[in-house]
Image (cartoon, helix red, strand yellow):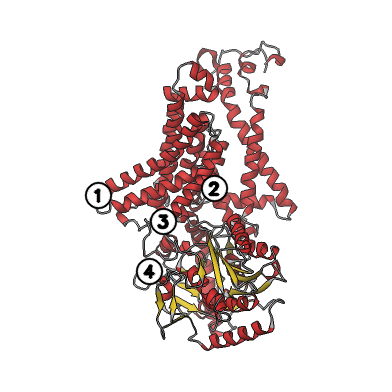
Amino acid sequence: MTDRFMLSRRQLLKTSAAGAALGLASAAFPIGKAFAAATTVGFIYVGPKDDYGYNQAHAEGAAALKSIEGLTVVEEENVPETVDVQKTMESMINLDGASLIFPTSFGYFDPHMLAMCKKFPDVQFRHCGGMWDKAKHPMNAGSYFGYIGMGQYLNGVVAGHTSKTKKLGFVAAKPIPQVLLNINSFLLGARSVDPSITCQVIFTGEWSLAVKEAEATNALVDQGADVITSHVDSPKVVVETAAGRGAFVCGYHANQSPLAPEKYLTGAEWNWAKVYKMFVADLVAGTPLPNFTRGGLADGFVKMSPLGPAVGEPARKQFDATLAEMMKGGFAVIKGPLKSNKGAVVATAGQAFPEAAIELESMDYLVEGVVGSTA
Amino acid sequence: MTDTVTGAGMPALFGARGYPAALEWMARRAETFVIPLAALIVGMALLSLFIALVGKSPVLLYETMWRGGFGSWFSIQNSLSRAAPLLLAALCVALPARLGLVVIGGEGAIVLGGVAAAAIGVALSGAPSFIVILAMGVAGMAAGGIWIGAVGALRHYRAVNETISSLLMAYIAIALMNQLVEGPLRDPASLNKPSTQPLADIYRIGNIPGMDVHWGLIVGVVACLLSWVLIEKTRWGFAARIAGGNVRAAQVQGLAVGPLIVGFTALAGGFAGLAGMLEVAAVQGSANASLAAGYGYTGILVAFLARHNPLAIVPVAILLGGIDASGGLIQRRMDLPDATVLVLQGMIFIVILFSETFYGRFKAFNPDLWTRPDLPRGAA
């Protein structure tokens, strides 16, 4: 039992030697894509793994790796964005022998993951969020992210068909570009059905603050919104509160339909399993992992929850048509002529910003029809 | 114990009275060690029950905790890193506690101390690093000091309950930080994680030589030592203890209770603010929402476990740092939820609070039993 937790230098040499021998053997006698030596991949989450949201989406991706033979997946949840996450990474490397680490929370990148990249140049780190910059950051670091705004557009299409009051509600964490793009996409999706639809947004100020999320949801329903969606770490409270008040809901991050089977319309979900399998496949093949990866619905990085029972036929039709359009590539949610809700022109006629457009990453406006303010 | 114990033939360490004096010395102090230690063990035993109920081995759990917290040099450094901010956070609870005040809003002072330090660090950029770091420390302490000092002032001059006000003010502090970091102090480049401008590397605080632990640990230990001296060895500390025992009596004695309360709470807040400054200068490199990591709340647990004794805060903080450090390994090795460690902390906390009722109840801890064997047992 004594040596189970710490790898001594001697053991390390032994295992590496064994690994090398096994590697040679498998080169001589190809045994498929199994790992030569035991490989460990680490996942770190900022919240609970079963939050029906951001962290669960990543944990589902990690779970998809567990069946791969020879691959060990280690996970740690509720790790704050402090020195704690640095120590967790070190611990995974030192005590578990992890050679690839996915710190999944946005705030883990700078300075925490970067510090570890410097300290462990032989370990690969891939961060969810798209911050990696070749000019500034080490090569053993990298980013992956998905264009989930398209999913919120599809949410909006279904919401637009379902809403009777023509008022939608959005519970958002912080007025940052990613969140603003989601809000705008949701409204524009709904307006593709009926241009008179509006969407009230309430910012809670925190990624995870259940009480405020419930208050915001109640306030939105009180004001007449009958379809609610959200962008907070865990949409659980929003979904349950809205459904409890009789409103319909669109999901985000993960599939929340078990929380409100009757009221859940659809949802914009991450499909991290696809991304993680891709990284691990590179690790197996021994090819360098990509440093910067992004994708949307067409690439399988993002997916939609199955349409719920309350979704009517016209909604289903437009949903399928729009989705097919998006799968072809080049679909632009933000396209002119378009004004912000303060009257500023954000896209002139003929101007279009497809999902990969760099301009979208510094979005600081809410489009016309969104009721709310970024500051 | 029999009545044959005399000083004859005993080590000279305790002088002519020898053995009984040594026993008395030990008996006077043993209580404060034995009771919390027993509480700790009872708390761990209670957790073992739960662990066994979910079908896991408590033995493996504690073995894993030991490995994760203290079992190797890496683990020890891991624990010390986590203990560093807890030292100062605990002082924010322990100092007012000596005045009989229960201040639980240290989180607010930490957050504001961090923001103030980051703002000063950015404003002074270009100045020599020594001056900037010093100014950041002063700014952090001032921000935290004003915040918790206000809690003390509200308590004394307006009779506002300090427990409630400090907790509510912590929420206000976090909202204020968000406002500043997302507004006037925001680095325009920090798009999706609003932060202040990053500090230049020369204004960052590094690690203790030879260790992977930042200087905040040393600062925290020194602050604990100074606080102990303040409370035990100075007249202000003495006055504070009197006021903590009985405010009316202190006032009748002519002690300036108001300034004493404001001064102690401000110093307590200053230490928490310093923790925030260290978090910015040694770990984060800028101020942002990650500052509200819950150190202020864990500090409450540390202070209560240490019975508000600044010297005891040091080992207790390291112990809790170790429990925290082992949490990850418990998740990974035993497939237990992260809450395991929180449940353990909670159980220890409750048992410790409960154990307060045992002080003075055990004859074994009564010095008279050892020094006056002539007395009948029952009279001890």
The answer to whether residue B318 of the structure is visible from this angle is no
The quarter of the picture where residue A244 lies is bottom right
Between B61 and B244, the one lying in front of the other is B244
Q: Do circles 2 and 4 both sit on a common chain?
A: no
Q: Are marks 2 and 1 on the same chain?
A: yes
Chain of the residue where label 4 is placed in the rendered structure: A
Q: Are marks 4 and 3 in contact (CB under 8 Å)?
A: no
On screen, residue B153 above or below A373: above
Going by the numbered disc 4, the residue's amino acid type is: His
Q: Earlier in the sequence, mark 2 or mark 3?
A: 3
Q: What residue is disc 1 on?
A: B128
Q: Residue at x 57, y 18 (%)?
A: B19
Q: Disc 4 on helix, strand or loop?
A: loop
Circles 2 and 3 on the same subunit: yes
Q: Residues within 10 Å of mark 2 (few under 14, many from 20)?
A: many
Confirm whether circles 4 and 3 share one chain.
no
Q: Chain of mark 3?
A: B
Q: Residues within 10 Å of mark 3 (few under 14, many from 20)?
A: many
Q: Is residue A93 left or right of residue B355?
A: left
Choose mark 2 or mark 1, whichever is in front.
Answer: 1
2 and 4 marks in contact (CB < 8 Å)? no
Secondary structure at numbered mark 2: helix
Q: Mark 3, mark 1: which one is toward the viewer?
A: 3
Q: Answer yes or no: are tags 1 and 4 on the same subunit.
A: no
The chain that hosts pointer 2 is: B
Tag 4 residue: A137
Kindly state the secondary structure of the residue where label 1 is placed: loop
Query: Can you give x and y, in whole percent of width and height, for residue A101 in the image?
Result: 51, 67
Q: Which residue is mark 2?
A: B322
The residue under label 3 is B181
